[in-house]
Image (cartoon, rainbow, N blue to C red):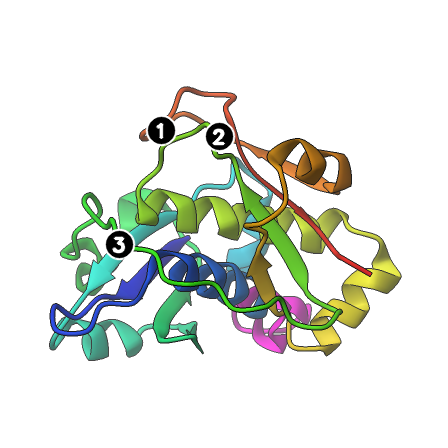
Amino acid sequence: MQIVVRAEKADPPNHGAVCEAAAMAVVRLLTDPRAAEPEGEWADAVHEWESRRIRKVTRRARGVRWPEAEKLPGLTVVHAGAEVRAFVPGPMADVAPELARLQVAGLDLEDGEPGPPPEPPYAAIALNPDVTMTTGKAAAQCGHAAQLLLRQGRRRDVAAWIAGGARVALARDVPWRDCVKRAAVAVRDGGFTEVPPGTMTAIAWLPR
């Protein structure tokens, strides 16, 4: 799955907002009727992707590149000053030219002051503080964590989360050890970029 972050030079989004928006974009695409319904136009592509090793690649776009990317099938989330679009997944060897030309490496944004978490239902995602990741990498890991939570979380809680808009908030003020105890799912990276394979990069749960 390709994920594109709008990162204009004059007014870039902050790191945390991008991570949250990426996670929401992934979940909202996967629960969109075009992906979730058996006869949906995206259903076959999503099923094929989820039946193999799941991979996400985060790219950045600015200027005319952003509207060009938005024309491709996918879903955009606007959140806390960030705009992130998740695209219908496909083979890595067959990425659309509008996306293939966008830069992958080097998306590393400053963080902003976090706001209070929303009222439940929402997904809490924590990034491993002992693992150094760029914003692009962290956004992909948050997307992974949200996807795992969608597929593996308690059905009733997940249904309420989705019905409430699939909101996501990074857990920042809770010690990592405590986050791990709460986690319903954990992401262990495949090792394609930035971190060794098997590294626990992100965890997620649904607060009550």
Q: Secondary structure at mark 3?
A: loop
Q: Secondary structure at mark 2?
A: loop
Q: Secondary structure at mark 1?
A: loop
Residue 29 location (% of width, % of height):
53, 68
Residue 145 location (% of width, % of height):
58, 46
Image height check: is 55 above or below 153? Answer: above
Residue 21 location (% of width, % of height):
46, 66
Name the residue carrying label 2. 189
Residues in magenta?
A: 29-43
Residue 113 location (% of width, % of height):
41, 63
Q: Left or right: 208 with respect to 135?
A: right
Q: Is residue 31 magenta?
A: yes
Which disc is residue 109 wearing? 3
Decide: marks 3, 2 in contact (CB < 8 A)? no
Label 1 amino acid? Phe
Q: Nearer the viewer, mark 3 or mark 2?
A: 3
Q: Residue at x 40, y 25 (%)?
A: 191
Q: Quadrant of residue 123?
A: bottom right
